[in-house]
Amino acid sequence: MAPPSHLFRPMKSSIQRGNISILTQDIHLRLSTLPLPRSSASYPLHFSKDPGAPSLILTQLTLVRNLIYQSLDVVDVSTWTGDAHDPSFIAGQLRLLFDFIQEARQNLKGGEDAVGVKWWQVYTDEKIFEPPIPQDLSFHLSIHEASLLLTIRTLQPIDPNTPTSTFSTETLTGFSLRQRLGLVAKLPDHDESGETFMYRGQEVKVKEKVRVESQDPSLMAVMAKLSALEHALAFSRRNLMIVMGITDEDDEA
């Protein structure tokens, strides 16, 4: 299990991972666009204690685990089932094993192509939390560079029937009006300002975004081992291709 990560304003949190899921968490938010509960100095997010409540599963780690299992199956087949004296068979097994290990490492590294990274395509089950999180709050936990990355977003639905105007209803009410009157500070810009996303079947904008990253020594160790395996497999494949007289172009075909 990864040690808890203690975060600071506008988000204070302690998160503990166990295998592919989050075991415990204690998160307190203080966002200018998130109304606080009465008599509370922060907005708490707590896991539901209901035995039937779903778990918070890290999709990237689920995929990594499955890819490692598939890699072990390839080793078993190569050892006990296939013809170990057939170079074409061994070359195919090495290529399959290399692909699995490479994909597993890439998912621990994260990035735009990793599964579960695009937050607007991932919906955290509200029943995980007690009370359920608001519909206009996005809770997104992912893996980036073998670290836990928690991103909280407050969302603003876009009404396609509302014309874009400085005198629209939205700009003259609530938080936006207080901001225009100078009663509250202007929201800090973020890298998603001005963008629109399709989230839960509705077009939204991100009003406020906070993120924090916490290193996970266990995941870093796994990523290092996968990288070493990937390099070793690449070296073995190249040597076998030389013996078989196969070029890179032939292998890709």
Image (cartoon, helix red, strand yellow):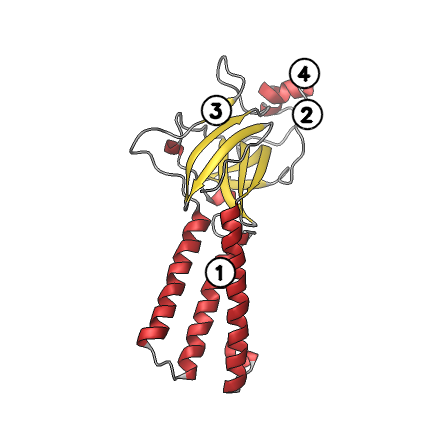
For the residue pair 105 and 18, the one nearer the viewer reads as: 18
Separation of marks 3 and 1 at Cα, in angstroms: 36 Å
Disc 4 or 1, which lies upstream in sequence? 1
Residue pointed to by mark 3: 44
Disc 4 or 3, which lies upstream in sequence? 3
Disc 3 or 2, which lies upstream in sequence? 3
Q: Nearer the viewer, mark 4 or mark 1?
A: 1
- Labels 4 & 3 near each other (Cβ < 8 A): no
Which of the numbered marks, if any, corresponds to residue 103? 1
Separation of marks 4 and 3 at Cα, in angstroms: 25 Å
Separation of marks 1 and 2 at Cα, in angstroms: 42 Å
Give amino acid for label 2: Lys
**Tag 1's secondary structure?**
helix
Separation of marks 3 and 2 at Cα, in angstroms: 24 Å
Separation of marks 4 and 1 at Cα, in angstroms: 50 Å
Give amino acid for label 3: Pro
Left or right placement of residue 95 versus residue 205 in this view: left
Q: Residues within 10 Å of mark 1 (few under 14, many from 20)?
A: some
The answer to whether residue 240 shows anywhere in this view is yes
Disc 3 or 1, which lies upstream in sequence? 3
Give amino acid for label 1: Glu
The answer to whether residue 253 shows anywhere in this view is no
Separation of marks 2 and 4 at Cα, in angstroms: 9 Å
Query: Percent position (x, y) of residue 141?
Result: 49, 40
Q: Residue reaching furthest top?
A: 39
Residue pointed to by mark 2: 186
Residue depicted at x 49% and y 54%:
222
Residue depicted at x 38% and y 68%:
74
Disc 1 or 2, which lies upstream in sequence? 1
Residue pointed to by mark 4: 183
- Labels 3 & 2 near each other (Cβ < 8 A): no
